[in-house]
């Protein structure tokens, strides 16, 4: 049941980033077209830039879930499986602490930026800065899932299925 919920959440996340990317393309096209016609609408670029920040951080979680981030496994691939799994757990814990710090400080930055507005829109800049702690929260969840899968592997339980999110 949990795997199904994670899979549905992952599909929803992919649909959201695809939809946001489509909106960004449309907004940039409209901005270019109206600028060419002599009546530029600057708000479309501001919205596209704000949405792009969200796409980047949500997309970073998708890459993390599918192990799409760059990694150097030259040394760890040569280690025994138990040692490799222990290292992955340790790195996962360090990464989780980093994401917690990003969430805490990202929320503080969002609160500080509440009164600031986007250049051409009456929208709080907090909308943009909230993408950082939200993306970090998604990546923290993915990291914890990977840690749990590695612990289960050490215990001889379920296979290392951290990408089943």
Image (spheres, rainbow, N blue to C red):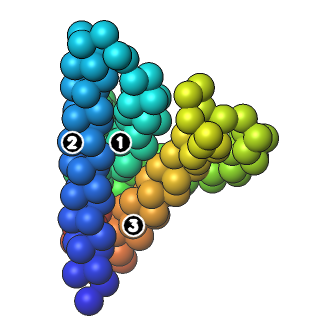
Q: Residue 12 is drawn in which quadrant? A: bottom left
Q: Pointer 1: what residue?
A: 55
Q: With respect to residue 135, does 128 lie above or below?
A: above
* Residue projecting furthest to the front: 38
Between marks 1 and 3 in the image, the one whose residue lies nearer the viewer: 1
* The C terminus: image quadrant: bottom left
User: Callout 2 environment at 10 Å: few (<14), some (14 to 19), or many (20+)?
Assistant: few
In the foreground, 107 or 141: 107
What element does badge 2 sit on? helix
Residue 135: image location, x then y, percent: 47, 49
- Give me the residue at 39% from left, 59% from top: 142
**Res 22 label:** 2
Residue 58: image location, x then y, percent: 37, 48
- Give me the residue at 60% from left, 42% from top: 123
**Res 75 label:** none
Tell me, yes or no, if residue 100 can be seen here: yes
Between marks 1 and 2 in the image, the one whose residue lies nearer the viewer: 2
What element does badge 1 sit on? helix
Q: Pointer 3: what residue?
A: 145
Q: CA distance from mark 1 to mark 2?
A: 11 Å
Residue 157: image location, x then y, percent: 29, 80
Q: CA distance from mark 3 to mark 2?
A: 30 Å
User: Callout 1 environment at 10 Å: few (<14), some (14 to 19), or many (20+)?
Assistant: many
Between marks 3 and 2 in the image, the one whose residue lies nearer the viewer: 2
* Residue projecting furthest to the bottom: 1
User: Callout 3 environment at 10 Å: few (<14), some (14 to 19), or many (20+)?
Assistant: some
In the foreground, 81 or 137: 137
| Mark 1 or 2, nearer chain start | 2
What element does badge 3 sit on? helix
């Amino acid at each position: 049941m949990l795997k199904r919920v994670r899979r549905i959440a992952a599909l929803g996340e992919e649909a959201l980033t695809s939809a946001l990317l489509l909106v960004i393309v449309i907004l940039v096209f409209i901005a270019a077209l109206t600028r060419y016609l002599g009546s530029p609408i600057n708000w479309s670029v501001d919205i596209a830039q704000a949405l792009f920040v969200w796409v980047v951080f949500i997309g970073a979680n998708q890459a993390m879930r599918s192990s799409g981030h760059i990694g150097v496994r030259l040394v760890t691939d040569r280690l025994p499986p138990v040692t490799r799994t222990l290292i992955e757990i340790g790195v996962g814990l360090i990464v989780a602490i980093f994401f917690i710090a990003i969430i805490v400080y990202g929320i503080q930055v969002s609160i500080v930026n509440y009164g600031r507005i986007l250049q051409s829109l009456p929208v709080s800049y907090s909308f943009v800065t909230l993408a950082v702690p939200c993306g970090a929260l998604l990546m923290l969840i993915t990291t914890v899932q990977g840690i749990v899968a590695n612990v289960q592997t050490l215990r001889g339980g379920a296979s290392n299925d951290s990408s089943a999110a």
